[in-house]
Image (cartoon, coloured by chain):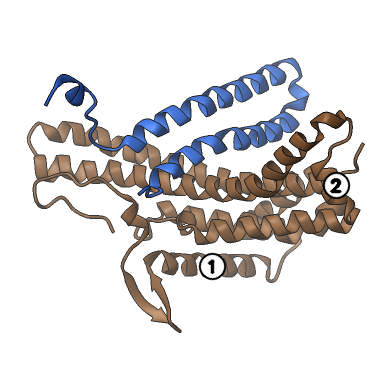
Amino acid sequence: MPRLATDGEFHGPSIDEFFPEILFNIAGIPVHRIHLVQFLSVIAIVVILVLGTRRMKVVPGRFQSLVEMGLGFVRGGIAHDLLGRKDGDRFLPILTTIFFMVLFMNITGIIPFLNIAGTSIAAVPLLLAVVSYVTFIYAGIRRHGFRFFKNALLPQGVPGFALPIVAVIELVSTFILRPVTLMLRLLMNMVVGHMLLVLCFSATQFFFFTAGGGWAALGVGTLAFGGAFTLFEVLVAVLQAYVFTVLTAVYIQLAVAEEH
Amino acid sequence: MDATTVLADINGHLAAVGYGLAAIGPAIGVGIVVGKTIEGVARQPELAGRLQVLMWIGIAFTEALAFVGIAVGFIPFP
């Protein structure tokens, strides 16, 4: 929870921001502010995508063309580009879901009064990373059968004495580090982005209202930084959605690729 | 309190120092990735689209180390 500096001292943001107080329970599961933000962004995705794809016209209106642009970007720019037409269309639903889910949950980080990204608690990035993990292993087994694990762990052209080392490195990097870095990249981008914004704006509040006097000049600077970082967070939100989707597509591509 | 104790006394977030060290490698790496991409686009402007996709993938892999660096700071060590 954002705290205001009332006791004359400056309180920086801490990791407690992401463990707010429990508001109520649904069927024994505690629900707090960030969960409500996640519910809101899910509702927003459903409403926007349903409204944007109902009663489609041949000549799209402004709203319809915006939705079409987003869907077309995932299809043309990510799925077909990296996986080809056939595999791209097979995995398009999961890539589209990942892209829009990450995008909408990230963008709540800079929407006034929500002010926190739905992806800034571990659950959502973890879920998406597991989905991506299961998808690329499924894609590999579907295409190559058990040979997928052999291809992944024992690349061809490696001399025999190096095989055990290479196998261990490939095991760690493919089956452990991939999901972990997918999750950490998204989570930490959102956590750090939120902390930077809180730091800038709580410092502004402190300089203007608690310190006062000449300190207010510094407050102008922190306010400007806060504004700049808000714009930067828009970029990060879109970029992380793109990177998460592209990496999932790349992992699927590597899994279905023919060994040569 | 003797001199060594005073000199070795560190206050505040040690994690911030650790993160600073952890960020050096990824910073250099991302710089190389982006620099090489610009070089490539300058030589072959028609490949800009493909190179950009590869650049983002390269950046994503490189900067992962920096995020591990941030995450470690939040792990409560006994």
Instruction: Tell me the SS state at disc 1.
Output: helix
Which residue is farthest bottom? A27
Residue A207 appears in which quarter of the rendering?
top left
Q: Residue A150, which numbered label?
A: 2
Q: Which chain is blue?
A: B
For disc 2, the chain is A
Amino acid on which disc 2 is placed: Lys
Same-chain check, marks 2 and 1: yes
Residue visible at 67% across and 43% down?
A172
Residue visible at 52% across and 25% down?
B25
In the rendered image of this protein, does residue A237 appear above or below residue A130? above
In the rendered image of this protein, does residue B42 appear above or below residue B33? above
Chain A's colour is: brown
Return the residue nearer the eye: A146 or B16: A146
Give the residue number, with chain letter if any, for mark 1: A42
For disc 1, the chain is A
